[in-house]
Amino acid sequence: MEEASYAAPAVASDEVRGDYTGAVYGSLLAASVVVGAGTLGSFPRLQLIALLLGTGVVFWASHVFARLFGARMVSRLSWTTVRRTAREERPIIEAAVPPAAAAAVAPLLGLGPQGIAWLALLVALAGQIGWATLAARRAGASRRLMLVAGAINLFLGLLIVLLKVGLQH
């Protein structure tokens, strides 16, 4: 039953770090945020950074809430369980940092608003593909399966890019 996953921490920190689901999800979320912001026209860089980081925090909190209360373990919650769950879901927030950093430094590269959005989007998609491939590798997948994981995430990323292009025209 679900009790084992909400009991005292039984998972070693290396095992928790081996689950890159949140990082893959967070990277795709960040790409979606960039696309959504870009469809509003010329989106200010600082607002894009705040939106990326803020959305990451909100989705992280919603995932923590869903895991804690979705399992109907409300009567058995402890601060240890809450902290562990928050830590395990942290990659969702961490995945928003590289695209936000890219948006922050983009003016140093001479990029305007559209260039900033594209750079942030490409960084988010690179993260998504990278995390998915690393997850497959850490799971002991063959090279072929690692390529499949990367290719599927590339395809999902390209869908986001097509959405961005389609909504801007």
Image (spheres, rainbow, N blue to C red):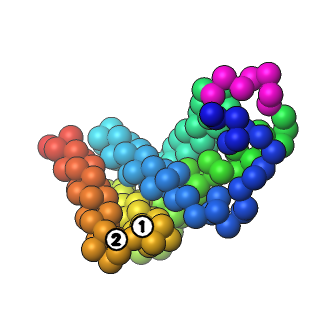
Q: Amino acid at mark 1?
A: Ala
Q: Residue at x 55, y 58 (%)?
A: 19
Q: Give x and y (percent) for residue 18.
A: 58, 64
Answer with the quarter of the image where residue 149 lies. Answer: bottom left
> In the displayed structure, would residue 49 be above or below residue 62?
below
Residue on which the image places disc 2 = 146
Local packing at callout 2 (Cα closer than 10 Å; few below 14, some 14-19, many 20+) is many
Whether residue 30 can be seen here = no
Left or right of 157: which side holds 100? right
Q: Residue at x 70, y 41 (%)?
A: 4
Q: Give x and y (percent) for residue 167.
A: 21, 40
Residue farthest front in this picture: 1
Q: Give x and y (percent) for residue 93.
A: 59, 51
Looking at the rendered image, the quarter that the N terminus falls into is top right
The number of numbered badges drawn on the structure is 2
Q: Is residue 74 magenta?
A: yes
SS at circle 2: helix
- Return the mark for residue 7: none
Residue on which the image places disc 1 = 136
Left or right of 14: which side holds 58? left
Q: Residue at x 73, y 61 (%)?
A: 12
Q: Give x and y (percent) for residue 138.
A: 50, 71
Left or right of 106: which side holds 61? right
* Dots 2, 1 in contact, CB < 8 A: yes
Give the alpha-carbon distance from disc 2 to disc 1, as whole Å: 5 Å
Looking at the rendered image, the quarter that the C terminus falls into is top left
SS at circle 1: helix
Q: Amino acid at mark 2?
A: Met
Stretch in magenta: 71-77
Residue farthest right in this picture: 79
Which comes sooner in the sequence, label 2 or label 1?
1
